[in-house]
Image: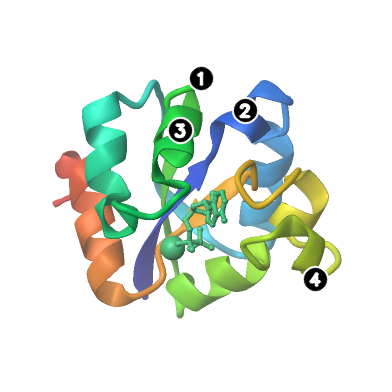
Amino acid sequence: METTFAIIKPDAVKAKNTGKIIDRIEQEGFNIVGMKKINMTKNVAELFYTVHKGKPFFEELVDFMISGPCVVLALQKDNAIKAWRDLMGATNPEKAEANTMRKLYGTNVGSNATHGSDAPETAKTELTIFFQELN
Ligand code: IDP
Ligand code: MG
């Protein structure tokens, strides 16, 4: 079993899509091993997205992530990292496959409803930032 890190981003929380996304996560066979609703601080958002520092959208991205509460999750399943990335769909909701989280609930490449770790190392780093209690 693998554990990945997921976020229901502020746009999806604001739009009251939290329940629908959590329902789908459970329907798809993930075990939710950690979950909490948080207000991300600017420092944490900058740390979390440090790989994108210097890119033109970095400030917009950080401002978006601190624009309202989000829900952070630790999700367990066989091949959880790929399974959750597949369920999320492409970064740009317009390019995301039908029935994916980003297609269903995303608005544009910035406001795209969900986050998911992209590799085992990033999953570990991201889980450590938000779920010290799971270590
Ligand atoms: P990912 O979330 O699918 O892994 P990344 O390329 O890692 O995509 O980008 C991280 C996040 O930054 C995206 O989910 C999206 O919210 C935001 N982002 C990426 N590219 C752009 C852009 O061109 N404009 C605005 N925001 C972007
Ligand atoms: Mg990424």
Which residue occupies 44% across, 28% down?
Answer: 63
Q: How far apart are marks 1 and 2 (CA)?
A: 8 Å
Q: Identify the residue under disc 1.
A: 68
Quick one: SS at disc 2? Answer: helix
| Sequence-first tag of 3 and 4 | 3
Which residue occupies 48% across, 36% down?
Answer: 60
Q: Identify the residue under disc 4.
A: 97
Q: Which x, y percent locates residue 135?
A: 13, 52
Which residue occupies 68% across, 44% down?
Answer: 21
Residue kind at label 1, given as amino acid type: Gly
Q: Identify the residue under disc 3.
A: 65
- Local crowd at mark 2 within 10 Å, few (<14), some, or many (≥20)? some
- Marks 1, 2: nearer the viewer: 1
Q: How far apart are marks 1 and 4 (CA)?
A: 27 Å
Quick one: SS at disc 1? Answer: loop
Query: Which quarter of the picture shows residue 107?
Result: top right
Residue kind at label 2, given as amino acid type: Val
Q: Identify the residue under disc 2.
A: 13
Which residue occupies 27% across, 39% down?
Answer: 46
Determine contact: label 1, label 2, CB under 8 Å: yes
- Marks 3, 4: nearer the viewer: 3
Closer to the camera in the image, 96 or 20 = 96
Q: In which quarter of the image is ligand 2?
A: bottom left
